[in-house]
Image (cartoon, rainbow, N blue to C red):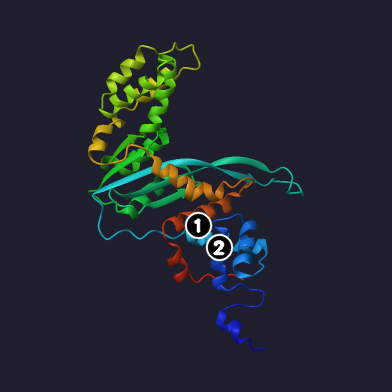
Amino acid sequence: MLRPFCTRADVKARGTSRRLQRALVDFGAEESFARAVGRVREHYGVDVALGRLRRHTLVHGAQLSALAMPPPKAAAAVLVTQMDGSLIPIVAPPTHGADRRKGKQLHWREARLCLAREKESATVCYGATLGSVGVAGALWRQTACAAGLGEDTRVHGVGDGADWLTTQFGEQFGAQGQYLLDFWHVSEYLGAAANVIQPKKAQPWRRRQQGRLLENNSRAVLRALALHVEPESQEEAPVRAAQRYLSGRREQLDYAGARQAGLPIGSGEVESGHRHVIQQRLKLAGCWWKEPNAEAMLGLRVARANQLWDSYWNHSKLTLN
């Protein structure tokens, strides 16, 4: 039987046209699958099974995950780059037993998000993974290359003092890079110490130490802390924690140099990225993910943030029924 409309629309009986697939994935990338079904019905007057919408979203999401950002034509003189981790909920099905609804294991996995951009640019390249620290480090460099990393590019990294972060930054960028401790993370340590050292004047004390750090006078800050360090036998020791945190990372405290060069001293950019790239979809209330599905959705969200959405639908040949 000839079906001219089906042929022209490239859709089979009980199938899904490519245009509808795009709409399904669009809604599924932003809303829970149940709410996405309702939005498709509201906007297009089409009833779609929840399972179909989920399948289209995750399969196309996995395909989008493989897309790479094309590098710019010219290398950047200065790159700003950041990385941080965010926990997302993962469910692991039972390994044995007939009833797979029982014995599920729920846990939290760290999704590592990195970003890179030219110093004066508002265009940000993102990368994200649930993989190991080594995988995250390789992705960090790959994301920097997409943003314009060249042989002579100076790389300005900002983040907290986690050992895996500073180690990976050094391995991926070497002598090209200069890592700076997130100023607000350092300030949290100083704030906790201030409550012990000057409980009635904690805020002025903290601000005085912050001012010293902004002038690269970390020695004065360490001296102020050293006078009040708790004994080793005391478990809760915020002053000792602040002193150790700063004294072990003095080469990462060049706030005066960063400010003079017009570079950020805080990692708020990647923390904001966690909210709108990852958490907005993968941390919905009551939402738990199988790991492969979380990887697909993570790749989908990153691809959309990297402005690869139109390119995918204009060139991809994948069509599902």
Mark 1 and mark 2: Cα distance apart in space: 9 Å
* Residue type for callout 1: Leu
Residue at x 29%, y 54% (from the top left corner):
148
**In the picture shown, does residue 75 fall above or below 188?**
below
Residue 227 at x, y = what percent?
35, 11
The quarter of the rendered structure image containing the C terminus is bottom right
The residue to which callout 2 is attached is 25
Element class at badge 1 = helix
Residue 298 placement (x, y as % from top left)? 51, 52
Is residue 67 visible to us here?
yes
* Label 1 vs 2, first from the N-terminus: 2
Q: Is residue 52 above or below residue 79?
A: below
Depth check, mark 1 against mark 2: the one in front is 2
Secondary structure category for the residue under label 2? helix
Find out whether the residues at labels 1 and 2 contact each other: C-beta distance under 8 Å.
yes
Place of residue 200 in the rendered image (x, y in percent of width and height, measured from the top left): 43, 15
Q: Residues within 10 Å of mark 1 (few under 14, many from 20)?
A: many
Name the residue nearer the viewer: 116 or 177: 116
- Which residue is pictured at 47% across the width and 41% down the height? 85
Figure disc tally: 2
Say whether residue 71 is left or right of residue 16: left
Q: Which residue is disc 1 drawn over?
A: 300
Residue 54 rendering spot, x and y as whole percentages: 62, 60
Residue drawn 37% across the image and 43% down it: 82
Residue 16 location, quadrant: bottom right
Residue furthest toward the bottom? 2
Q: Residue at (28%, 44%) from the top-left corner? A: 155
What amino acid type should be assigned to the residue bearing mark 2?
Val
- Quadrant of image for the N terminus: bottom right
